[in-house]
Amino acid sequence: WQQAVQKVRRAQEKLAAENPELLLNEASITDNDTDTAGANGAGKGSAGVKGSTDRARNVAMETRRALEQRGERLQQASERSEEMRQNASEFRDMSAQLVKQQKERLKSGWV
């Protein structure tokens, strides 16, 4: 369980570093979530485990949503890049055509 919590924490930290605008406050795993003993040393029981499991599930869902959003932004950036590449290619072709026309006009003496 603790290894899973550590993996989720690392994923949260990486996600927060890449997307500081995302706040996972309510879904974050805290040190208290990994503590299976109460103040008097007795276990929390199934309610504590269920709460921790629910919080871990919430973190996983929030992380998944954030990754999906990132994927969408990357897809949009890729589409914009392709459009810009196409526009640049068309511009290059039109520029070459204009240069060719100007050279032909100069050769013919028509300016």
Image (spheres, rainbow, N blue to C red):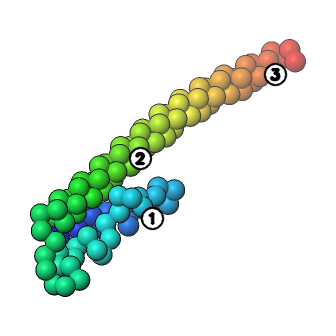
Q: Residue at x 27, y 58 (%)?
A: 55
Badge 1 or badge 2: first in the primary sequence = 1
Residue that extends furthest to the bottom in the rendered view of this protein: 40
Badge 3 or badge 1: first in the primary sequence = 1
The nearer-to-camera label among 3 and 1 is 1
> Residue 96's x, y, as percent?
65, 27
Is label 3 in contact with label 1 (beta carbons under 8 Å)? no
Residue 82 versus residue 91: which sits nearer the camera?
A: 82
Q: Please tell me whether residue 106 is drawn above or below residue 11 in the rendered image.
A: above
Q: Is residue 99 left or right of residue 19?
A: right
Between the C-alphas of marks 2 and 3, the distance is 53 Å
The nearer-to-camera label among 2 and 3 is 2
* Element at label 1: helix
* Element at label 2: helix
Q: Residue at x 65, y 24 (%)?
A: 94
Q: Is residue 8 left or right of residue 81?
A: left
Does the image show residue 52?
A: yes
Q: Which residue is mark 2?
A: 70
- Could you tell me the amino acid type at mark 1? Ala
How many other residues sit within 10 Å of disc 2, few (<14), some (14-19) or many (≥20)?
Answer: some
> Residue 32's x, y, as percent?
28, 74
Badge 2 or badge 3: first in the primary sequence = 2
- Could you tell me the amino acid type at mark 2? Arg
Q: Which residue is mark 1?
A: 17
How many other residues sit within 10 Å of disc 3, few (<14), some (14-19) or many (≥20)?
Answer: few
Q: Which residue is mark 3?
A: 106
